[in-house]
Each structure stands twice: as C-alpha cells, then as structure tokens.
Image: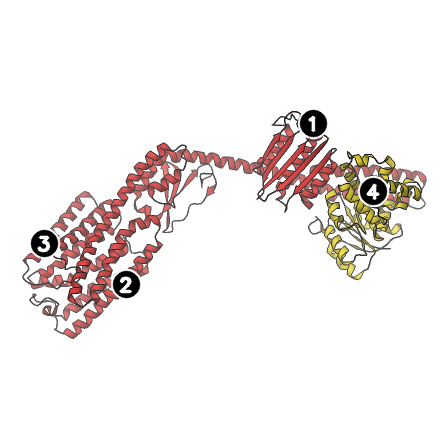
Chain colours: A red, B yellow
Amino acid sequence: MDRRRAVLALLVAVAAGLGSLALTLTSSHAEPRGPVQSGGPVMGLVIGWSFAGAGVVASVLRPSNRFGLLLYATGLAWFLSALMAAERPTLFTLGLLTAPWWLGVFVHALLAFPGGRLEGRWRRLLVAVLYVDVTVVQVLRLLFTRSGDLPGCGDCPDNVLLLSDQPDVAATILVVQQAVIGSLVIGGTLVLLTRQWLDASVPQRRVLSPVLLTGAMCLVVQAVALAAEPFSVRQSVDWLGALAFAAVPVAFLLGLLRQRLDRSAVGQLVVDLGASRDGFGLDDLLRKALRDPSLQVAFWRGETGEFVDAAGRPVALPVPDGQQAVTLVERDGRRIAALVHDESLADDPALVSGAVAAAGLALENERLHAAVRAQLEDLRASRRRLVEAGDRERRRLERNLHDGAQQRLLAVSMLLSQLERAPGGDATTRELAAQAQAELGRSLSELRDLAVGLHPAALTDYGLAVALHGLAARAPVRVELVVEMPRRPPLQVEVAAYYVISEALANVVKHAAATRASVRVCDDGSILQVDVVDDGVGGVHAQGGSGLQGLRDRLAALDGRLVVTSPPGKGTTVRAMIPCA
Amino acid sequence: MRVAIADDAVLLREGISRLLGDAGLDVVATFGDADALLAGLETTPVDVCVLDIKMPPTFTDEGLRAAVAIRAQWPQVGVLVLSQYVELGLAIRLLAEGAEGLGYLLKDRVADVEEFVDAVRRVSEGGSALDPTVVSQLLSRRQTDDELGRLTPREQVVLESMAQGLSNPAIAHRLHVSVRAVEKHVTNIFDKLDLPVASDSDRRVLAVLRYLRG
C-alpha cells in the first residue's frame, strides 16, 4: 500500500469510527448487541480504530501480505454494525444484517495469520462455513424475526426484511446459527491454531505467539458468553471479551515491534562482524541477528557450479517446503552464497537483505576460504586416486606374473625333471636337463622376489599381521615384532603400513648400522599406529630421502602422518599414524 | 598310497599327478577347487591330499580352509599345502594346531621329485614337511642369538632338517652320514638349546618351531 492510499484508508477509518460513535450516542433506542460488543461506545471506537490502524500499518510494512487488509476489514465491519443504532428502518436493518460480519472477517484474519493466506483445506472450509453463517443464515433469520423480539430491542425501528413473523422458525435458525459459530467455528479454529503453534519453528513462534494467544482467548470468551445464560455472568464475560478483542491488534503491533527489534539486531551484526576475525562463526552471527537457530550458510563454488559448506564439502540446498526457504546472496552481480533459513524469514525480505548486506564482505571472504578448502579436498582425493591406481596396477602385474609366467615355468620345470628321470635317456641329456632345471629354479626364485617387490600378495590374501612376519624374518637384523590388531583395517591402510615398515627396515639395514630393530603395530579402532625403532646411529634428516617422501605422500592421501625422530647416536624412530575408523 | 590333488591350474594339476604316478604313488582323484575336493573325499578315501593354497572362487585361502576342514573331518588323512609363495606368518597359523600329517611347501619344490615325493610320503604317514624357506626365515630371526651360535655348523644343518620335518634316517640320508651320527647331533642340539626331549618327529618339529619362533 502506498502512502496516499494508506492516508486515505486511515481517513475512511476515522470517519467510520466517528460516524458510528455519533450514531450510538444520538440513538434513541437500545441495540441488540452481541457479546464482546457491549464494552461501551468509547471501547467500541478503540477496538475498531486499533484494528483498522494496525491493518494499515501492516499493509504498509508488508504490501504483499493480505493480513493487513483483513485486519482493516475487521475494523470497518466492526463500525458497520453500529448502524443498528440508526433510526431509519433501512439503515437499522442494514446494521442488523451486517452485525455479525466482523466475526467472520476476524476469524478469517486469525486463521490467515501470519501469511495472509488460508493454508489448507480445513481452514478454507471453516472460513467459508462461517461466512455463509454470518451472511446467508443471518438474512434467513431476519426474514422471520420481528425487531421487537430481538433481545434488548423493545423500541427498535422496524425490520424491513421481515417476511412473516414466526418466532419459532426464527428461534430455530438462531440455534443453528449459534451452534455453528459456537462449536464448529470457534472450536475448529482453536484446534487449528493449537496445531499451528505446535508445528511452528522457534522464529515462527516469536511472531505467532502474541496474536494467536489473544485471538484464541477472544474466541474462548465468545464461546463462554454463548453458553452463559445468567445476565450478570454474561456481562462480566462480555467485558473480558471486549478487552481480549481490543488486545488482538495490539498483539499484532507487538509482533511488528519485535521485528523492528530484529532490524536493530542487524546493526549489532555489523558490530559483531567487526570484532570477529576471518569470518569466524559467521553462521552463528547470522543466526543470532536473524533469530533463526536453523540458519545455515552455503557458499557458491563457481568452478564446479555447486554449493559447499565452510569446510569445502559439497552441500545440496533444500527444496522450499514450507519449513525451509533459501535466499541467494549476490555481490557485484555475482552469486557468492545462499542462506538456508526458516520459511518465516521469507515474510520479511528487507530484514534478510539487511543482514546479508551487513555480512557481505565477510561472506565473500568466507566463500574464498571455503573454495580453498574445497580445492585442498579435491587435491587430496586426486592424490588418493593416484596412489590407489598405482597400487592397483602393481597388484595386477603381480597377479599376471603369478597366473602366467610363474605357473608355466613351473610346468616346464616339472617336464624337465621328468626328462631327467626318463628311462633310457643318455647321460648328457640328463646332465643338461638337470642344469636347465637348476637354472629354471633360480629364475622362478627371482621371479617370486620380483612379484613380492611389486606387491606383497600375502598382504592382500592374509592381512598385515601375516605379511609382517615374513617381512621381519627377511630383514637381515633381528626384528622384534608386536602386532596388536583386533581386526583387519582397510586394505589401503594395510598397504601403507606395510610400505612404511618395509622402507623403515630397509633404511635400518642401509644406514643405521643397527643390530636390532623393533616393529610395533597397534590399532585402537580409529588410528593404526606403526612404530619402527632401531638402536643404530641415528642422525637421519627429519625429511628423509626420496623413500620417506614417497611414504609421506602415500600417508597424506589417507590423512595419515609420518614422524621421524633420529637424534645422532641414539637410534631412529619412524612413527606413522593412519586413520582407519 | 592313495593321493588326491586339488589345483585350479590344469597344467600343474596334471604335472603333479603324472610326477607322483611315475614315482609309484596312486593318484586316485584330481579336483579344480576346494569344494570339489571336500565333496570327493566323502566318496573316495585317500591317504594324503596335495592342494594349492589359492583356489577359486576368491583365490586367497580356500586351500588353507580346506586343509583345516580335512584335518577336522578325517584326522588320519595327511594334507600337503602348496603355495606360490610361502609366508612365515601363514606357516605359524597353519601349524598352530599341530604339525602332525601336515605339510606346507613352496610350489617350486615339486620339480625336485625325490624331495617332493618324500614329503608327500612323510605327510601321509603322519609326519610333517615345512618348506626350507620358512625354516630359514625362522633361523634368520634367531641368527644373532647366542644360543644358536653355540651350535656347530653341522648341528645347525641338522636343526634345519628337523624343523623341515625330516626324520633321523632321512636326515642321515641327506647328509650322507649314519643314523647313529644324526642321533648324536640331535641329542647335542637338545642339550645346548635346553629343549624337552621328544621322541616322535612331529612333536620334535613343533618343539623346534616353538623354540625358533622365540
């Protein structure tokens, strides 16, 4: 609503209010007022104006939200019912006709809060039934009711709609009308409001609570008033109802005020961002500023066209489902991030865009951090793939050797041994066959060493513990082996541990001039720790040679670490830690 | 002597079969995998099984598990496990329950017909056969040991042969000495290493292995 129309609407409300007050004060007859309406002329004015005023304010703040319009309509309908005070029968009858309209619009507004739309079948049905009840049924009732028969209306003007005076029919229609209002509409509305409250998220409840509470209280009072017969009880209940009713628009203004407070939280956000370093806890600050504990920040990664979290891991944005909504953040025309937040924040885009503008630089900064982390993760994954591809290829070569050349050479060896022992062969043939077989035996032995060097098959077949026995036994120094592994870790962890120990033992032999070494492998369920300790000369450079660097790469691909401690003259300790959860 | 052979490689299966047949053993059945072997043993009684440690379907330790199953169901049947490579750790696992009627040899050994046939016979008669590679790995673990250093070179060779599962006469034959001489060496070894005296050869193997494993 623009300013001109807002002023116009306010003027209309002021005029309607003053008109209704004038009618009421100058009226010469009593009015058949219902419950809630009997708070007196001034109270009536306050109620009507507060609804209309709150409606205009809401429409200005949220032009796209029809809730403000409904509040305004409630206020006008409220004033309309004052026509019952008019002296002219046509105006008086119009007042009778429109007397219950305000209730229809009010319940409509209550059920449409805060979005301004009736969500769901039940709400639409309920409001439709109520509108029929306060319009069509009201007309029907007036067709058969003489105005003098209305409660407290002995000297009222004539009801121009009167068709035929039938008090019995009129009483029956009244019972139906009140039953619909009492049980169906009020009861149903209370149920729906309770459910709405229970389903609401924390930020939604902040907005809902004042309006739903006062609205529901108002309906309860209305229900009690319908049921209460004794006049004295009824009068006090009516006053209570009028108070509760007057409180509804106040409650709504309170909700608006809360959002004003939220806006000041954006100012606080600017201060907090200045105090925090490197966008640390950025999402926490945004959660605080927007009062939405469920808020999450996702950063745009342009090169892959996906959103990532602060750690650089890809995240999927949720599909808007009435619970969560997504606000895209742009800076200088480029997308930099997305806020995943509670649906209720979408009602106040100005608040979100204010917070986003305040956090823009920090978001951009954090996005760059996230992008770097994502690239690191990519790099690590590619290193892992390289190591795995290398291992796979070595394993394939080893298997080919085993299944092919080794088997065939062995078969040839057996044939030679048969030739050597064949009856009737001459001495030279036997001698040559024996030589060939011995030669073949050495080839087989070398081939086997080559295969083990390519890939220790025992490792794949039987696990680290079995493979290490052989490794320790083959080492030319005495190796004490302790293996504490309750289970087999993943193969690539076993392979890495094996190569660490193999390389460390080779170094012990080559450089350490050690007499003994100890190997300890311990799996505590999350980390596989390998220690290779020797009693040699020490003094190994912490970075080590190319062999150690290769091990570091292999371990880094598994998020593992290699630490070499080698004080001169005090032996060397190689420790590897590999996550294996 | 009735022999069953299980190996998925036809070339080797037939080769071993012919080789043992030529040596006068009775090869009654050959199989392509462990399950077929176990099923076959139900109907075909044998004295000894020669089987590859890697067989279908996973080519890891089917032979090993078949060996354990055979020893549980037919304790009198000897089992000789052949492998493309021998691993000390696996030998330790295989012999954990006892070395009686059990052998673990590198596949290459089949080409040395006399030794191989001897190993098959030994295993079928309840003896054992442990590949020299495994034994030398065990010995190398203890090479800096003072106790082993007290053995004479000849005694060390006898110890190695004992660990491989050879009987005294077999050791005597291999070393071209008299059985009496071997017995003397054995007594000396047991004294020097402070081992409990064991008469039958498979207990002796275990005692020696246990000692060598430290």
Foreground: disc 1 or disc 3: 1
Number of labels in the image equals 4
Q: Answer with mark 4 or mark 3, whichever residue precedes in sequence.
A: 3
Percent position of residue A104, x then y: 22, 60
Q: Amino acid at mark 4?
A: Ser
Q: Amino acid at mark 1?
A: His
Evaluate whether label 4 is on the same chain as label 3. Answer: yes
Decide: marks 1, 3 in contact (CB < 8 A)? no
Decide which of tag 1 and tag 4 comes sooner along the chain: 4
Q: In terms of sequence position, does the residue under pointer 4 or pointer 2 come before the other?
A: 2
Estimate the spatial distance between the alpha carbons at disc 4 and disc 2, rounded to whole Å. Answer: 97 Å
Q: Quick one: SS at disc 1?
A: helix
Which mark sits nearer the N-terminus, 1 or 3? 3
Which residue is denoted by mark 4 in the rendering?
A413
Please, what secondary structure does the residue beneath circle 3 have?
helix
The residue tagged 2 is A187
Classify mark 2: helix, strand or loop. helix
Q: B168 or B147: which is nearer to us?
A: B147
The reply to whether dot 3 and dot 2 touch (C-beta < 8 Å) is no
Q: CA distance from mark 3 to mark 2?
A: 34 Å
For label 1, count other residues whose C-alpha is less than 10 Å away and answer few (under 14), some (14-19) or many (20+).
some
x, y percentage for residue A414? 84, 44
Q: Nearer the viewer, mark 4 or mark 2?
A: 2
User: In the figure, A128 relative to A472: above or below?
Assistant: below
Residue A293 in percent (x, y) is at: 37, 45
Q: CA distance from mark 1 to mark 4?
A: 39 Å
State which chain disc 3 sits on.
Answer: A
Query: Circle 3 sits on which residue?
Result: A19
Give me the residue at 58% from left, 38% from top: A558
Q: Residue at x 16, y 48 (%)?
A: A9
Which residue in the structure is indicated by mark 1?
A511
